[in-house]
């Protein structure tokens, strides 16, 4: 039986037997995807009768917890690098790891009309500060790639303000300390719309998008509800919720 067939069988099993034998799945959720995952978990519970017990924390914190023996059935990570390391350390059930969404990069300003629809504001280079996450981090590398592809890395180097995380970068821009900067679409989206300001959705040809990955962990190996939840995360209902929160498939 291939992986897709196994997931489908697991889902059908949980759907058909939910009234008599509902299961439980312990899901470790990265902070950056907590909002859509709450909705997805609620939808999953309604549709299957299974219960989701969520633990929300930064991906790095969940990684440490898992290495130290925390028992989660599923990890819904904020990036693929952590799951790759966990898989190498044999904490991931082989064949279950996959990309459930990508996190699009956006050039954003809290000021209306400041960022144009083609990102020409970068080329004009008339701003004083450009906020980015450190390029040594998963969410910082895409911004560095964009500047390189546009051929303006050196021109804007003295205007870059590096923050330790992508959340800090967003907060720095929102405070007005920097006129604009690179963030993820999910950080500035509410119900599928830009919450405030102006933005340029950076074409994927200019950077490698951050891939959001999920997998069944070893404690959930024999938990059909865990397999069912992971399959549900691939489905259209979960996809629609993720899109509303600024994540693409």
Image: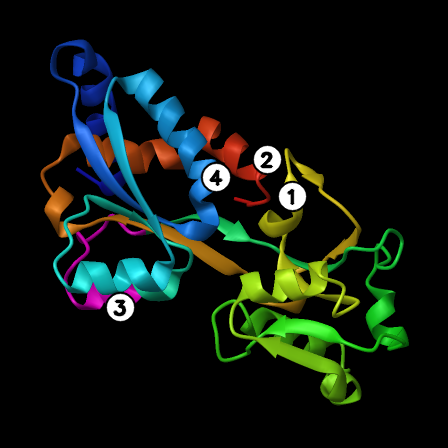
Membership of 166 in magenta stretch: no
For the record, the magenta segment spans 83-97
Q: Which of marks 3 and 4 is nearer the N terminus?
A: 4
Q: In this view, does 15 lie above or below 139?
A: above
Q: Residues within 10 Å of mark 1 (few under 14, many from 20)?
A: some
Mark 2 against mark 4, which lies toward the viewer? 4
To which residue does mark 3 refer? 85
Magenta portion: prevailing SS class: loop
Q: Quadrant of residue 37?
A: top left
To which residue does mark 2 refer? 244
Q: CA gap, disc 2 to disc 3?
A: 30 Å
To which residue does mark 1 refer? 189
Coordinates of residue 210 in the picture (x, y in percent) = 50, 61
Q: CA gap, disc 1 to disc 4?
A: 11 Å
Q: Earlier in the sequence, mark 2 or mark 4?
A: 4
Q: Residues within 10 Å of mark 3 (few under 14, many from 20)?
A: few
**Residue shown at the point (55%, 78%) measured from the top left:** 135
Mark 3 against mark 4, which lies toward the viewer? 4
Is disc 4 placed on a helix, strand or loop?
helix
CB under 8 Å between discs 1 and 2: yes
To which residue does mark 4 refer? 35
Coordinates of residue 231 in the picture (x, y in percent) = 31, 34
CB under 8 Å between discs 3 and 4: no
Q: Quadrant of the N terminus?
A: top left
Q: Earlier in the sequence, mark 1 or mark 4?
A: 4
Is disc 2 placed on a helix, strand or loop?
helix
Q: CA gap, disc 1 to disc 2?
A: 8 Å
């Amino acid at each position: 039986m291939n992986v897709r067939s196994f997931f489908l069988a697991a889902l059908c099993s949980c759907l058909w037997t939910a009234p008599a034998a509902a299961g439980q799945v312990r899901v470790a959720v990265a902070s950056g995807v907590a909002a859509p995952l709450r909705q997805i978990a609620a939808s999953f519970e309604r549709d299957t009768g299974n219960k989701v017990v969520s633990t929300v924390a930064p991906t790095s914190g969940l990684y440490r917890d898992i290495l130290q023996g925390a028992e989660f059935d599923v990890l819904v990570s904020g990036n693929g690098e952590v799951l790759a390391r966990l898989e190498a350390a044999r904490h991931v059930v082989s064949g279950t790891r996959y990309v459930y969404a990508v996190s699009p990069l956006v050039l954003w300003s809290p000021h209306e009309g400041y960022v144009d629809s083609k990102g020409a504001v970068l080329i004009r280079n008339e701003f004083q500060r450009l906020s980015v996450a450190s390029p040594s981090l998963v969410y910082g590398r895409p911004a560095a790639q964009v500047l390189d592809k546009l051929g303006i890395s050196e021109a804007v180097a003295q205007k870059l303000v590096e923050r330790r995380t992508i959340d800090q970068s967003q907060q720095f821009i929102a405070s007005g300390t920097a006129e604009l900067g690179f963030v993820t679409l999910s950080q500035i989206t509410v119900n599928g719309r830009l919450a405030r300001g102006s933005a340029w959705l950076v074409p994927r040809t200019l950077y490698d998008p951050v891939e959001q990955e999920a997998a069944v962990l070893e404690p959930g190996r024999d938990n059909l509800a865990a397999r069912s939840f992971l399959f549900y995360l691939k489905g259209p209902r979960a996809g629609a919720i993720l899109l509303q929160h600024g994540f693409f498939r």
